[in-house]
Image (cartoon, rainbow, N blue to C red):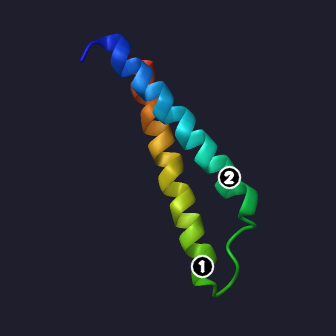
Amino acid sequence: MDKNTKLLELIKKRDDYKEKLTQMYKYFHGVKHESAHSELQYSEIKVYEDMLNSVVEEINNL
């Protein structure tokens, strides 16, 4: 895989993750006390944030 193709794929991933995070933030209103659902939402948001950060780092390294 050449550098251009990899860069285009990473940019597409980055945009997908940003869109997904935007949708998640729209419906997330913080972690409510004793709410497993909101804790799972929070965990999922953190996973997507980490995935987005790793893709951005990889783009910067190219």
Horizontal and vertical percent position of residue 8 = 43, 20
Instruction: From the viewer's perspective, tell me whether residue 34 is left or right of residue 48.
Output: right
* SS state under label 1: helix
Residue picked out by circle 1: 37
Residue of label 2: 23
Amino acid type shown at disc 1: His
Image position of 57 with respect to 34: above or below = above
Q: Residue at image x 34%, y 21%?
A: 6
Label 2 amino acid?
Answer: Gln
Taking 8 as reference, is 12 above or below it?
A: below
Residue 11, image x, y percentages: 49, 26
Number of other residues with Cα within 10 Å of mark 2, as a class: few under 14, some 14 to 19, many 20 or more: few
User: In the current view of this chain or complex, which residue is farthest to the bottom?
Assistant: 34
The residue positioned 57% from the left and 82% from the top of the image is 36
* Residue 3 position in % (x across, y down): 32, 12
Indicate the secondary structure of the residue bearing disc 2: helix
